Image (cartoon, rainbow, N blue to C red):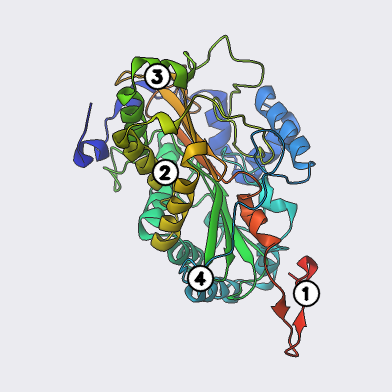
Amino acid sequence: MSHSAAELAKPTGEYRQYLPDLSLKRFQVMREQDAHEYAHAFKTQKQPPWLHGLYMHWLDLLQEPFKGVTTDGNVRPGLFKLQEEDVPIDAIVEATENVLSLADDKQRQALSYHIDSPEWRTWSNPEFLLSNKGLRLDEIDNKLRDAILNVLKVTLSPEGYDKAIKAMRINHFLGELVESTKVMNEFSYNFVLFGRPSTTRPWGWSFYGHHLCLNIFLYKGQIIASPWFTGAEPNEIDSGPYAGTRIMQIEEELGLRLMQSLTPELQKKATVFAEMHDPAMPPGRWNRDDQRHVCGAYRDNRVVPNEGIPVSSFTDEQKKYMYGIFEQYLLYLPARARQLKLDHIREFESETYFCWIGAAGDSDPFYYRLQSPVILIEFDHHSGVFLNNEEPKKFHIHTLLRTPNAGDYGNALRAQIPAIEGLNGKEIVWEKSAL
């Protein structure tokens, strides 16, 4: 199979046969409540029970000190280094300081967290506003909202920013489909700062909401965009002002090409479960929110053993598909940072693994993961959450990226950050409490 870029970009409209019954109570509630009322009702009424139970489990996971994703519970040291990546830090700082200048005192206080705050880890991708921190874009004036979006624009690559905006527009489209735009709309996202914007000291920002969560750590000319989550249900807009919008079809296509290009023997070895919700899966391997994902929200310390096949068994053509996938997953990074990250990934090619769940026909839904000591990416086709397809379909996609071995949130770099210059010109030891 092979499709042109134009074919891949074209919406299919397949999801329309799964539009839900909007007379159901859940949609009536979403029409009547704003995001805060909706979240409060969820937390107090504990409905649906399975999701509330998952939320309580997330809060338990948050009590654990951050370690990072590992293959065996042990963080491998020395994998990440401080380096110049040509990130436009001056422009990013200027854009962020503009946000702070436009915000009032109460808004600035809401925006600002300590760089080592555990609130870094409280992003999540459901539509419920489970952790309300920073500023929510649909609750502020247009000028401040545009200033926040400009921070994203100057931080991310142009193509990465475009992808983020498309995810937000698709979220609004879903909100319109289920008549619930009070909870799900183009601007139902929170923006929060960690540390103070600086060209010389570490800091970062988080932007999160339904189907789009970005965690960005910055230090001088270096950037860590990890963890991030991007999803869509459906992954296309086929009507209205943004008709023609579609995302995540390239990583889907490349993943399937890669799997189909393997020999039958390697396909069998790469496939860890034959069915998307396989009876052979151990307890916890599948859950209703993350489904096959293992490194979603709050899974900062997940132990994820290598599975499937080492990519050292790949042909040159198969490696080309693999690096094409990695490039798509690094799309949020500016060009130079992305290239350096790809070079870093290549250094660990001999320790990189590829695994698959599901079948591999052209129309089959599937899951895949690529994992090495320095990157972990997941792709998953989901069953319906708002649409009523009970089985996974290709129009509902979840993707995520983790940096294993304490790389998420820039943690692996922080201990390496050297002493900084004090105001009196004397060198002082960098102290986390000072940030």
- 4 or 1: tag closer to the N-terminus: 4
Q: Residue at x 45, y 39 (%)?
A: 175
The numbered disc on residue 92 is 4
- 4 or 2: tag closer to the N-terminus: 4
Distance of label 1 from label 3 (alpha carbons) = 53 Å
Q: Quadrant of the N terminus?
A: top left
Query: Is residue 236 something that shows in the picture?
Result: no
Describe the element under mark 3 as helix, strand or loop.
helix
View extreme (top): residue: 279
- 2 or 1: tag closer to the N-terminus: 2
Nearer mark to the viewer, of 4 and 3: 3
Distance of label 4 from label 2 (alpha carbons) = 25 Å
Q: Which residue is mark 2?
A: 326
- 4 or 3: tag closer to the N-terminus: 4
31 lies left or right of 312 = right
> Where is residue 53 drawn, in percent x and y?
72, 27
Query: Is residue 227 something that shows in the picture?
Result: yes
Tell me the kind of residue under disc 4: Ile
Q: Residue at x 44, y 42 (%)?
A: 171
Tell me the kind of residue under disc 1: Val
Describe the element under mark 2 as helix, strand or loop.
helix
321 lies left or right of 64 = left
Q: Which residue is mark 3?
A: 267
Q: Which residue is mark 1?
A: 429
Q: Residue at x 42, y 61 (%)?
A: 334
Distance of label 2 from label 3 (alpha carbons) = 20 Å
- 1 or 3: tag closer to the N-terminus: 3
